[in-house]
Image: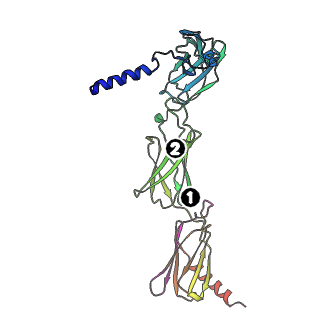
């Protein structure tokens, strides 16, 4: 016997031992089953009464609704509402069963196909929520929702009018005009907004914020911003026109108080200056740089630098109370100051304190 003949015989024997492939399978909402091998209760659920005979489904009993997408962009995305309509045994109802789809109170009558009732919802222009539902045979589905969001891509951010000049070393705020899409829907709260300042020296300051109550708000501290700046606001892929403003130097409310403490162990003096007050009623912001320079009768000047904390600075100068200081000046965001008379008075006061019993 040839190899091909042996293979043919094996196939014949295998097919002879297999059950018939044309056995009846019944389908319903719960899946496929074989009436010949399935429990009687399962056959009853499907309405099976005998070979080749299936009882027609009963009328609507339950509706399972689906609605989406859950977030539709205004003017762009269509929606789809559909419901599976089944009888009390879980069978899909017969085609042509009357069903009504209601969207935001507007009812659209129709018929089922494949046991399903559905309706395509055209793109909407108004942001918000649409409540939808389906009824059939006196039965009603649970309520579902379609959400419509503003068309963010169509929102053009703008800066309202002229930006007020800022005062150096103080906080200032930049806000946008109310933002809305092409249909007038306000920008949703929490959408990211970027505010950028381009300074005269080519550097940038950036604040990442978010929209709140139709607007964006960004806070800056006008520090190390020489000259003017141009502000822009960006939302998504769109940027506002730039708005120019200047940063003005703060105006000093007067010379800061000066105290001197002698540190003979290290041949140095501790200088405490402040508070540095402005005519706006504020102290210099923490971190503002202050430089003190002591010009001596002979030799190079002695310089110390510190940064404001709670309106004051404290620094060491490697000189003593007897050092021949010709002039003491202070440089800060409030401008140059000559504290020579105050220096002499502070040194004298410190000396009298040391010699007093």
Seen at 45% across and 60% down, the residue is: 226
Mark 1 lies on a secondary structure that is loop
Mark 2 lies on a secondary structure that is strand
On residue 192, the disc is: 2
Where is residue 306 shown, x and y percent of the image?
54, 72
Where is residue 160 shown, x and y percent of the image?
51, 42
Which one is in front in this view, the residue at disc 2 or the one at disc 1? 2
* Relative vertical location of residue 347 with respect to residue 225 in this rendering, above or below: below
* Relative vertical location of residue 120 with respect to residue 331 in this rendering, above or below: above
Q: Residues within 10 Å of mark 1 (few under 14, many from 20)?
A: some
Seen at 48% across and 61% down, the residue is: 224
Task: Give the residues in magenta.
Answer: 279-302
Where is residue 201 shown, x and y percent of the image?
40, 58
| Camera-side residue of 63 and 90 | 90
| Camera-side residue of 226 and 59 | 59
Q: Earlier in the sequence, mark 2 or mark 1?
A: 1
Is the magenta region chiefly helix, strand or loop?
Answer: loop
On residue 170, the disc is: 1
User: Quarter of the image holding residue 1?
Assistant: top left
């Amino acid at each position: 016997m040839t190899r091909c003949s042996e293979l043919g015989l094996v196939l014949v024997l295998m097919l002879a031992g297999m059950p018939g492939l044309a056995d009846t399978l019944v389908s319903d909402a719960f899946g496929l089953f074989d009436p010949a091998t399935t429990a009687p209760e399962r056959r009853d659920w499907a309405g099976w009464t005998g070979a080749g005979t299936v009882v027609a489904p009963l009328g609507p009993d339950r509706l399972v609704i689906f609605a989406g997408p859950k977030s539709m962009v205004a003017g762009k995305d269509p929606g789809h509402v559909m419901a599976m309509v089944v009888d009390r045994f879980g069978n899909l109802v017969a085609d042509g069963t009357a069903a009504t789809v209601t969207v935001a109170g507007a009812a659209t009558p129709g018929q089922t196909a494949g046991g399903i009732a559905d309706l395509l919802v055209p793109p909407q222009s108004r942001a918000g929520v649409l409540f939808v539902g389906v009824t059939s045979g006196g039965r009603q589905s649970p309520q579902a929702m379609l959400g419509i969001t503003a068309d963010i891509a169509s929102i053009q951010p703008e800066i309202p009018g002229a930006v007020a000049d800022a005062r150096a070393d103080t906080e200032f705020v930049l806000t946008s005009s109310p933002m809305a899409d092409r249909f007038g829907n306000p920008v949703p709260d929490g959408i990211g907004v970027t505010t950028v300042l381009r300074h005269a020296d080519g550097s940038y300051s950036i604040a990442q914020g978010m929209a709140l109550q139709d607007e964006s708000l960004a806070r800056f501290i006008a520090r190390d911003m020489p000259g003017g700046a141009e502000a822009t606001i960006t939302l998504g892929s769109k940027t506002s026109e730039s708005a120019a403003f200047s940063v003005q130097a703060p105006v000093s409310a007067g010379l800061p108080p000066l105290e001197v403490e002698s540190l003979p162990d290290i041949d140095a003096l501790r200088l405490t200056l402040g508070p540095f007050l402005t005519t706006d009623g504020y102290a210099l912001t923490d971190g503002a740089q202050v430089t003190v320079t002591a010009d001596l009768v002979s030799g190079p000047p002695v310089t110390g630098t510190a940064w404001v904390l709670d309106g004051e600075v404290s620094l060491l100068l490697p000189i003593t109370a007897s050092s021949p200081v010709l002039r003491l000046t202070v440089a800060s965001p409030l401008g140059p100051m000559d504290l020579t008379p105050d220096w002499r008075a502070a040194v004298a006061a410190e000396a009298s304190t040391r010699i007093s019993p």
